[in-house]
Amino acid sequence: MKLRKVTAASATVFALALTATACGGDNSTGGGSSSGGGKTITVGIKFDQPGLGQKTPQGYAGFDVDVATYVAKKLGYKADQIEWKEAKSADRETLLQRGDVDFIAATYSITPERQQKVDFAGPYLLAHQDVLVRADDNKIKSPKDLNNAKLCSVTGSTSAQNVKEKLAPKAQLQPYPTYSACLPGLQNGAVDALTTDDSILAGYAAQSQFKGKFKLGGFKLTNENYGIGVKKGSDLKNKINKALEEMVADGSWQKAVDKNLGPANYKNEPAPKIGDIKS
């Protein structure tokens, strides 16, 4: 009889535990609710782009990180409630469509093709394809001056190929695995220039070991509107736009630009008009 009483009590406790679990739902899961009611919010960033989105021993740093942190705060999340997830370029749409992240701030250029798959808030930065050269090099004053120059070509990037095909057909493309690998080559003269978005170039050049050694050409070869990606139809889009407007208005946006990209003499455009999506 005693045994039966204990068993019955255990069954009751077990049933109550199941009920509590069901009622608790996913209150403690990653990917928080859009109202900020969840415990955490999951944000996609780059982990390997200095000045924009980089994972360091001290944490996460860069302009995109600062923008995302500000936005998350306006959505109701403290910095320690943000779960950072790596958003590689090829994975960004999939991460949003599967719900693996709530939003993505990762040098995410707004294009018609991407707008078919995801929605964008912003733009929050207008970048341009440009070139980075040595600070004491005055020979390259226009894209045409890249003819016969050694131009860093990163595997999988179309930027250097675009320059060669459209602006400097005699440019000598030098293959490197990453932009980080290009910088020592640029410093020691193995290459004369490297090219990609000016914001990305500024971020790399702003690293402490390279400060003052490089400069941007200022050529503005293309327009790249960076947006914050959200799942198609998400109500986060309008909320993030409002947060971005506040970031520009209170001066936090410009401070983030100056802190993360300023050391490479990056000259940003006027603050973008939030909600004016151009691709």
Image (tube, rainbow, N blue to C red):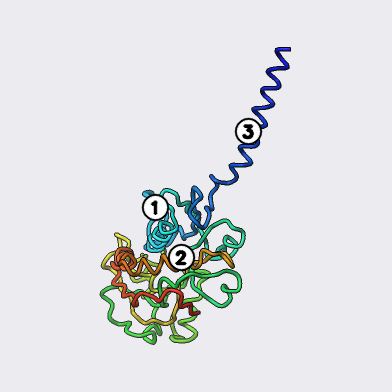
Residue 268, quarter of picture: bottom left
- Three-letter code, disc 2: Ile
Q: Which residue is mark 3?
A: 17
Say which mark, if any, is on residue 56.
1
Badge 2 marks a residue whose secondary structure is: helix
Q: Establish if 268 lies above or below 65.
A: below
- Three-letter code, disc 3: Ala
Q: Nearer the viewer, residue 169 or 215?
A: 215
Q: Position of residue 74 (x, y in %)?
A: 41, 59
Marks 1,3: beta carbons within 8 A: no
Q: Which residue is mark 2?
A: 240
Q: Is residue 173 visible?
A: no
Q: Position of residue 70 (x, y in %)?
A: 39, 60
Residue 67, quarter of picture: bottom left
Which residue of the protein is positioned furthest toward the top in this rendering? Answer: 1
Q: Position of residue 159 (x, y in %)?
A: 47, 76
Q: Nearer the viewer, residue 6 or 84?
A: 6
- Three-letter code, disc 1: Thr
Q: CA distance from mark 3 to mark 2?
A: 38 Å
Image point (34%, 67%), residue name: 253
